[in-house]
């Protein structure tokens, strides 16, 4: 006998009416990544913005090649190049207002530099003389983050705190495609949406997490689609189209600033270099794929737009290239100087006030250093790597 | 008698109430103090420590968050970056583990990575330890994990007055503090007045709870009452035990501990957490290094067994109780045991 057959007992009432809490349709990303360069819509773009983006892209590319060269000279322990992804890096920095905050990952040195950070200070982490080479408050750039996706909840918390204080601050947080699989990505997006925090998440989908292709990372239709599950809009953009990334991010920033809540932006791009200088990219991807993406180069795309619209001539391009060379020469020269390190710094910033135990350990190191100085006078930490 | 006069009178107050009062007072004194966690709002936390805070200060100051420990602590990091003083409630000890990545990779070292530019004035309240009949994942003693992470303070109050005073100090600290609240002492009461709380020395100071001459019991948090009771019982055997309450594991008050051990010449470290790789090993090593010539016997440990926290019906066999402490005290007669050739030594 089933429940329903029991004599005179069970009278089902109709279930309570169900409706989706929000209409998912406006949250869904477009089927194709948004593009501007080379389309009719590009005619409306501000020439000044395009020229600015171009200058930054050229300098950014030069920064990447210079920093990569510095790893070969042993001046940098490691450098995760963003060659091919400069449009995302530059646009992320340029859409921020002065009071806004940037939360970069280890690959986003360039975004930090485009934001105004001293190129040498931005490389301190990767050179190895300290974990963060700059005061995050100075340009409102959080420390470059090494664990994947863990900086995303920080961005949410900061944006939330700023809004509680009544400040007009938006946080832009960057993460890779692999990072979107981490729990912190999920938790950050969920918090941001529930709190309607003024945050913009920028996923640079460069195809790989070290060697693992996107297909093995996620089964989602796109990374932008993930936004819908949290109740925020997902936007898909061509990550090599600097104008398009700038526009999509600007809209998301505007939305956040006006109280509209967070947005998830997926920029579809490609990592031209290996993951870092320690990686052998030929083991997991064919050269033909790289070559195909080289043809869709962010600098090339913008150059074509600028020249076809006669907004920039060869002389103008040459001027940008020279400016980039000057930046690279300066970077090279300063990076070739040995940083002066004070070993006693090991104990300086662990706690606001040193514990007894740390004071004792500091004394021990000081004594060791004094003994070493006696043995070989003039020896200075940092003169040798 | 006026209402205020009634209030200032000392009356029995539970540790949970004193903790709640500390949160309330800290929030009233400093608008940058924000409480966040799971169920801290309307419910007042599963232990009711945050009871009334949302009502008094609003949802922006005492916030029910989504159910996500890494998200809670990660958001707290961002809030601290922007000048707030977040107080995070982890619902139970073992549920803080999802947030370990944020704790170890960011909270504990943000000051260090930024050369002091970004201190993390975050307090993480963790209801911890056993003895309340909780099912699995509700009774862990996780202090050793926290102690092993440079950059964190680790605090464990054992009295109502300390609960209030240390929580205020933790919230006021510019460094992150793991604030371990001994669950089974939540309902312990003492005559205490929230309006004239006893002065409690800052984080990092141990206190001698009972003076004695024969041996020192070194303990903290939920094991303090056990040790005090053991000390009372031991008088019958002719032992006059000193009891040191560490109050804070990081920083560790070596001075008070070693001064006591030098006086008594014998020491037992008592805690619920596992013995192997537990806090007692560190403390015993320090005492041995500092007080070797004063020691009449090896430093002994009375700890929980080296097992996953047991099911509630068995926890009484796991938790170090008065008998186990007294047994260790008896074994401190090292010299006579040694010469008699009996089976002695540490457990
Ligand atoms: C929590 C964590 N796990 C593993 C690593 C090691 N790791 C560094 S980069 C990387 C791949 C990240 O790929 P993606 O998020 O796509 O970013 P991309 O490097 O492509 O910019 C991995 C696995 C890490 N940094 N953090």
Image (tube, grey):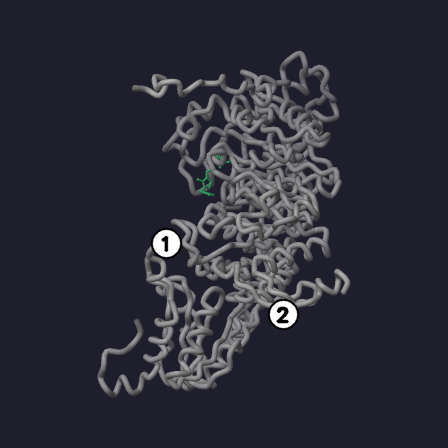
Looking at the picture, how far across and down is residue A192, in whole percent? 60, 35
Q: Residue at x 64, y 58 (%)?
A: B22
Disc 2 crowd, CA 10 A, few/some/many (<14, 14-19, 20+): some
**Secondary element at image label 1:** helix
Q: CA distance from mark 1 to mark 2?
A: 34 Å
Residue A347: which quarter of the image?
Answer: bottom right
Residue B289: which quarter of the image?
Answer: bottom left
Q: Residue at x 64, y 13 (%)?
A: A39
Disc 1 crowd, CA 10 A, few/some/many (<14, 14-19, 20+): some
Q: What is the chain identity of the residue bearing mark 2?
A: B
In the displayed structure, B138 sits above or below B226; it is above
In the displayed structure, B295 sits above or below A142; it is below
Q: Nearer the viewer, residue B329 or A355?
A: B329
In the displayed structure, A252 sits above or below B177; it is above
Does residue B287 appear left or right of residue A128 in this picture?
left
Q: Residue furthest top?
A: A40
Q: Residue furthest right?
A: B2
Report if residue B306 is visible in the image.
Answer: yes
Image mark for residue B346: none
Looking at the picture, how far across and down is residue B10, in whole percent? 66, 67
- State the residue position of label 2: B200
In the displayed structure, B334 sits above or below A189; it is below
Q: Are marks 1 and 2 on the same chain?
A: yes
Marks counted in the figure total 2
Question: Which mark sits nearer the N-terminus, 1 or 2?
Answer: 2
- State the residue position of label 1: B312
Report if residue A370 is visible in the image.
Answer: no
Q: What is the chain identity of the residue bearing mark 1?
A: B
**Secondary element at image label 2:** loop
Q: Residue at x 60, y 56 (%)?
A: B111
Does residue A1 appear left or right of residue B147 in this picture?
left
């Amino acid at each position: 006998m089933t429940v329903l057959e029991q004599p005179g007992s069970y009278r089902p009432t109709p279930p309570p009416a169900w409706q989706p809490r929000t209409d998912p349709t406006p949250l869904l990303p477009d089927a194709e990544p948004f593009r501007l360069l080379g389309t009719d819509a590009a005619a409306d773009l501000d020439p000044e913005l395009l020229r600015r983006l171009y200058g930054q892209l050229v300098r950014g590319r030069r920064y990447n090649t210079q920093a990569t060269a510095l790893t070969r000279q042993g001046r940098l322990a490691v450098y995760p190049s963003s060659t091919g992804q400069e449009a995302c890096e530059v646009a992320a920095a340029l859409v921020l207002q002065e009071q806004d905050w940037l939360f970069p990952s280890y690959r986003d040195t360039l975004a930090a530099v485009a934001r105004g950070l001293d190129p040498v200070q931005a490389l301190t982490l990767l050179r190895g003389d300290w974990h963060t080479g700059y005061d995050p408050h100075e340009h409102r750039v959080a420390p470059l983050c090494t664990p994947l996706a863990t900086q995303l909840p920080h961005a949410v918390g900061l944006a939330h705190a700023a809004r509680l204080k009544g400040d007009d601050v938006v946080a832009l947080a960057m993460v890779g495609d692999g990072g979107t699989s981490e729990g912190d990505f999920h938790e950050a997006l969920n918090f941001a949406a529930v709190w309607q925090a003024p945050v913009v998440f920028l996923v640079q989908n460069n195809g790989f997490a070290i060697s693992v292709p996107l297909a093995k990372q996620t089964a989602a239709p796109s990374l932008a689609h993930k936004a819908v599950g949290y109740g925020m809009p997902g936007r898909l953009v061509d990550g090599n189209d600097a104008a398009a990334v700038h526009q999509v991010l600007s809209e998301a920033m505007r939305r956040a600033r006006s109280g509209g809540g967070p947005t998830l932006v997926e920029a579809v791009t490609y990592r031209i270099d290996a993951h870092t200088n320690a990686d052998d990219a030929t083991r997991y991807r064919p050269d033909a794929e790289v070559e195909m993406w080289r043809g869709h180069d962010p600098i090339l795309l913008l150059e074509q737009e600028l020249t076809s619209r006669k907004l920039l001539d060869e002389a103008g391009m040459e001027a940008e290239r020279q400016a980039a060379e000057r930046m690279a020469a300066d970077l090279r020269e300063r990076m070739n100087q040995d940083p002066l390190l004070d070993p006693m710094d090991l104990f300086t910033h662990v706690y606001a006030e040193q514990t007894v135990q740390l004071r004792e350990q500091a004394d021990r190191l000081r004594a060791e250093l004094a003994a070493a100085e006696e043995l070989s006078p003039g020896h200075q930490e940092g003169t040798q790597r | 008698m006026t209402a205020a006069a009634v209030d200032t009178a000392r009356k029995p107050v539970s540790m949970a109430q004193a903790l709640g009062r500390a949160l309330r007072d800290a929030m009233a004194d400093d608008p940058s103090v924000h409480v966040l966690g799971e169920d801290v709002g309307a419910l007042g936390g599963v232990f009711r420590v945050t009871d009334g805070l949302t009502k008094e200060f609003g949802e922006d100051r005492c916030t029910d968050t989504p159910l996500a420990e890494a998200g809670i602590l990660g958001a707290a990091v961002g809030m601290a970056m922007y000048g707030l003083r977040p107080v995070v409630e982890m619902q139970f000890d073992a549920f803080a583990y999802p947030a370990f990545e944020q704790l170890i990779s960011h909270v504990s070292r943000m000051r260090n990575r930024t050369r002091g530019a970004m201190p993390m004035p975050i307090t993480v309240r963790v209801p911890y330890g056993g003895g309340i009949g909780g099912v699995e994942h509700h009774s862990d003693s996780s202090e050793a994990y926290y102690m092993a992470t440079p950059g964190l303070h680790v605090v464990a109050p054992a009295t109502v007055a300390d609960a209030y005073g240390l929580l205020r100090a933790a919230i006021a600290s510019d460094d992150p503090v793991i604030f371990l609240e001994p669950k089974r002492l939540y309902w312990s009461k003492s005559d205490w007045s929230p309006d004239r709380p006893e002065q409690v020395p800052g984080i990092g100071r141990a206190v001698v709870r009972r003076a004695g001459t024969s041996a020192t019991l070194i303990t903290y948090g939920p094991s303090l009452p056990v040790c005090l009771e053991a000390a009372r019982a031991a008088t019958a055997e002719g032992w006059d035990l000193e009891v040191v309450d560490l109050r804070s594991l990081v920083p560790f008050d070596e001075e008070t501990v070693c001064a006591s051990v030098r006086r008594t010449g014998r020491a037992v470290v008592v805690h619920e957490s596992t013995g192997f790789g537990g806090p007692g090993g560190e403390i015993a090593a320090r005492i041995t290094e500092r007080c070797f010539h004063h020691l009449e016997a090896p430093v002994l440990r009375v700890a929980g067994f080296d097992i996953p926290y047991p099911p509630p019906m068995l926890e009484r066999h796991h938790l170090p109780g008065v008998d186990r402490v007294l047994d260790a005290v008896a074994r401190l007669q090292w010299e006579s045991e040694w010469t008699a050739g009996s089976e002695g030594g540490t457990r």
